[in-house]
């Protein structure tokens, strides 16, 4: 028999509204008319439908690693139902749902200060019956951060020396996503311009075999929330005359950030993504940090997820012309169009970019042939040259190549 359950939608210990959730699908079927508007999640604040889609996209994407099979084996019908059973908790922000008769408070349930064991995330790396058996999704006090963790790569959260850390795998067996994260870390460290997530390589097990993954600390906490750019942008109606880029900046300014700080961050991010040929800077791969008490924005979240870069999915390296015609998933569809937003190309110091031998040493840790490594490095050096041309005033998007 199916039915609906009522929950408070909570922000820490404040009631935002009451929602009705379908027991089978885990989706929100109704939202009470009484709503504390200022506490609504950003991106869910313009209409009741927004809250339903916010909840849906808060659930782990079914494409992530092997999550679909894991949920099926656990008898969980879908991702929103998993999210409901985990009380909607996340390691990102301070929202959760609470059954109307529940005695719990935020201090007792939040994943930032209460210990957890991310068994569901673990199963994405090791198919182990003993882990599968100890999972108790119906238990009232075990919550899984993986119910709300975004992105398509396999991943799990662990607690290491008291810190919440995310471990990520790769696409395929070259380990390039993890290596690219570490390369991006080196680049940002050398540039020392904006906050960034520090990734380190780590050993992981995938399908009972050895692999190289990466690990980083959570930048959200009991005192700071992360809100993806997607939700920031959706929190205000966009004026049709504005680009997505300008709209995002305006919403950030409306919430307390200075125009200069946002523009500088975004321009630096565009330029560093250009050098690394990161093609995946979509609106869930950057965002802002928010003070959960004042609800004011604190600043841009540190740069994270630069894994899909360095020509990771090219069978052979693009030639000159295609190198200026790279498609990206971001504010614009072409890398060169993103570059046009940048006012100050010298935000990246070319002398402080990772050297060729540093890049090579990192790439050699993966399962790549010498030929692939040479090709990737050639592409990296050519992108560096193009940046230098931009810094000298060339409009590289106007370049014409013969062949
Ligand atoms: N260091 C971190 N601290 C807090 N949240 C993080 C961190 N890294 C990633 N996330 C969250 O997890 C999501 C997935 O991580 P991401 O690195 O983007 O994985 P993928 O490569 O699969 O897209 C991000 O969209 C973000 O919401
Ligand atoms: Mg991502």
Image (cartoon, helix red, strand yellow):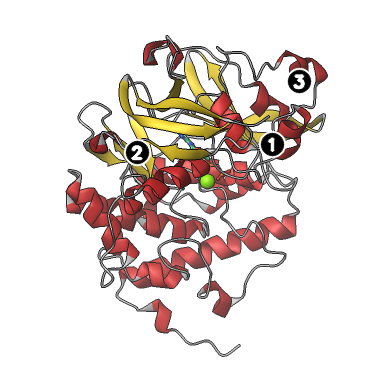
Distance between the alpha carbons at the discs numbered 3 and 2:
33 Å
For the residue labelled by badge 2, is the local secondary structure a helix, a strand or a loop? loop
**Tag nearer the camera, 2 or 1:** 2
Q: Which residue is mark 3?
A: 132
Are discs 1 and 3 less than 8 Å apart at CB? no
Left or right: residue 201 compared with residue 33: right
Q: Is residue 242 visible?
A: yes
In the image, what residue occupies the spot 38% across and 72% down? 389
- Nearer to the camera, 32 or 343: 32
Name the residue nearer the viewer: 210 or 354: 210
- Marks 3 and 2: which is nearer the front? 2
Q: Is residue 116 above or below residue 87?
A: above
Q: Residue at x 51, y 67 (%)?
A: 382
Badge 3 or badge 2: first in the primary sequence: 2
Q: Of callouts 2 and 1, which one flags the residue occurring earlier in the amino acid sequence?
A: 2
Q: Position of residue 345 (x, y in %)?
A: 30, 64
Residue of label 1: 67
Disc nearer the start of the sequence (1/3): 1
Q: Which residue is mark 2?
A: 41
Disc 2 C-beta below 8 A from ligand 1:
no
Residue at (29%, 56%) from the top-left corner? Answer: 248
Q: Residue at x 45, y 63 (%)?
A: 384
Q: Quadrant of the C terminus?
A: bottom right
Is the distance from the Cβ of mark 1 to the nearest ligand 1 atom less than 8 Å?
no
Determine whether 296 is above or below 115 in the image: below
Q: Assign a secondary structure to mark 3.
A: helix
Q: Residue 150: which disc? A: none
In the image: residue 228, left or right of residue 154: left
- Kindly report the distance in space between the C-alpha atoms of the residues bearing marks 1 and 3: 13 Å
User: Can you tell me whether the CB of the residue at mark 3 lies under 8 Å from the nearest atom of ligand 1?
Assistant: no
């Amino acid at each position: 028999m199916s039915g609906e359950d009522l929950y408070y939608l909570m922000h820490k210990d404040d009631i935002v509204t009451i929602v009705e959730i379908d027991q089978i699908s885990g989706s929100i079927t109704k939202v009470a008319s009484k709503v504390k508007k200022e506490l609504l999640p950003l991106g869910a604040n313009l209409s009741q439908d927004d809250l339903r889609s916010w909840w849906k996209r808060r659930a782990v994407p079914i494409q992530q690693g092997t999550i679909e099979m894991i949920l099926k084996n656990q008898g969980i019908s879908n991702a929103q139902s998993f999210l409901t059973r985990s009380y909607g908790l996340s390691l990102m922000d301070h929202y959760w749902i609470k059954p109307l008769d529940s005695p719990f408070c935020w201090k007792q349930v939040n994943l930032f200060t209460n210990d957890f064991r991310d068994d569901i995330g673990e199963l994405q790396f090791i198919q182990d019956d003993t882990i599968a058996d100890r999972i108790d999704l119906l238990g009232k006090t075990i919550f899984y951060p993986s119910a709300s963790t975004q992105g398509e790569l396999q991943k799990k959260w662990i607690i290491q020396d008291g810190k919440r850390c995310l471990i990520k795998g790769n696409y395929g067996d070259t380990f390039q996503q993890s290596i690219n994260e570490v390369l991006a870390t080196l680049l940002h460290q050398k540039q020392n311009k904006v906050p960034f997530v520090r990734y380190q390589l780590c050993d992981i097990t995938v399908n009972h075999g050895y692999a190289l993954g990466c690990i980083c600390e959570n930048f959200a906490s009991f005192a700071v929330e992360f809100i993806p750019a997607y939700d920031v942008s959706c929190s205000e109606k966009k004026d049709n005359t504005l680009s997505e880029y300008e709209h995002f900046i305006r919403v950030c300014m409306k919430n307390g950030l200075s125009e200069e700080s946002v523009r500088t961050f975004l321009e630096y991010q565009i330029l560093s993504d250009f050098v690394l040929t990161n093609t995946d800077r979509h609106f869930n791969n950057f965002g802002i940090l928010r003070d959960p008490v004042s609800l004011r924005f604190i600043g841009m979240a540190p740069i994270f997820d630069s894994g899909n870069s360095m020509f990771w999915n090219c069978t052979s390296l693009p030639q000159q012309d295609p190198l200026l015609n790279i498609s990206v998933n971001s504010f614009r569809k072409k890398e060169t169009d993103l570059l046009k937003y940048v006012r100050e190309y010298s935000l990246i110091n070319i002398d402080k970019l990772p050297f060729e031998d540093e890049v090579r040493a990192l790439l050699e840790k993966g399962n790549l042939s010498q030929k692939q490594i040479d090709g990737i490095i050639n592409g990296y050096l050519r992108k560096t040259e193009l940046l230098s041309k931009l810094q000298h005033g060339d409009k590289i998007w106007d370049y014409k190549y013969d062949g």
